[in-house]
Image (cartoon, helix red, strand yellow):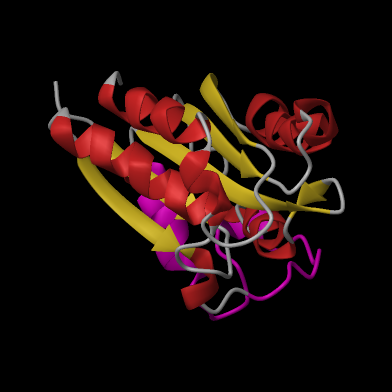
Amino acid sequence: MSKNILILSGSFRKGGNSDTLCDEFIRGAKEAGHSIEKININDYHINFCRGCGVCNTTHKCVQKDDMEKILHKMVDADIIVMATPVYFYNMNGQMKTLIDRTVPLYESISNKDFYFILAAADSSKSNMHRVLESFRGFTEDCLVGAKEKGVIYGTGAWQIGDIKSSPAMLEAYNMGKNL
């Protein structure tokens, strides 16, 4: 059965390493017949959460930016892929800002399958676990019925294109293909 997949790519570098892994995931998922939308979150205007709490009761953010569009896409998706380059042992700021801004509808982002794509210059997966724990904090502690289905670690990728010789490319393709 065809699934509706939303890819949230946090990379500032289109064609960068985490973004390239997204494209391989997409290639596999398309071949399997799924519907995919990729959002480069840096192409959208997303303000920082102000912590005002208004959205806790209104389910609408007081800020008028592009986040509302992304939130509705997250609610409508069957599968959400969140991809980030790893900066100083954590997800990049754009991805964290997006997560912070899900509060108005996070209760509606329910029963989703999640995949995580991480790319870093470091050659060790162990230094990427902090990022994964941050994603898990969001999905496991904040979302109802979220299921982690897979993680792709793109290690040893510093310069644009370094990831292309990594086994993570095949992992990303196969993960998309085998949804």
Q: Is residue 61 magenta?
A: yes
Q: What quarter of the picture does the N terminus occupy?
A: top left
Check if residue 161 falls in the magenta segment: no
Residue 112 located left or right of residue 46: left
Residue 113: x and y in percent read 44, 25
| Residue numbers of the magenta segment | 47-75
Name the foreground residue: 82 vs 69.
82
* 110 w.r.t. 145: above or below: below
Tell me what residue is drawn at x 54 percent, y 46 percent: 163
| Image point (47%, 46%), residue name | 164
- The percent coordinates of residue 55 (x first, y second) are 65, 59
The vertical placement of 28 against 179, above or below, is: below
Q: Position of residue 37 (x, y in %)?
A: 29, 53
Among the 4 quarters of the image, the one containing residue 174: top left
* Residue 145 in view, yes or no: no
Residue 131 screen position, x and y as percent: 76, 39
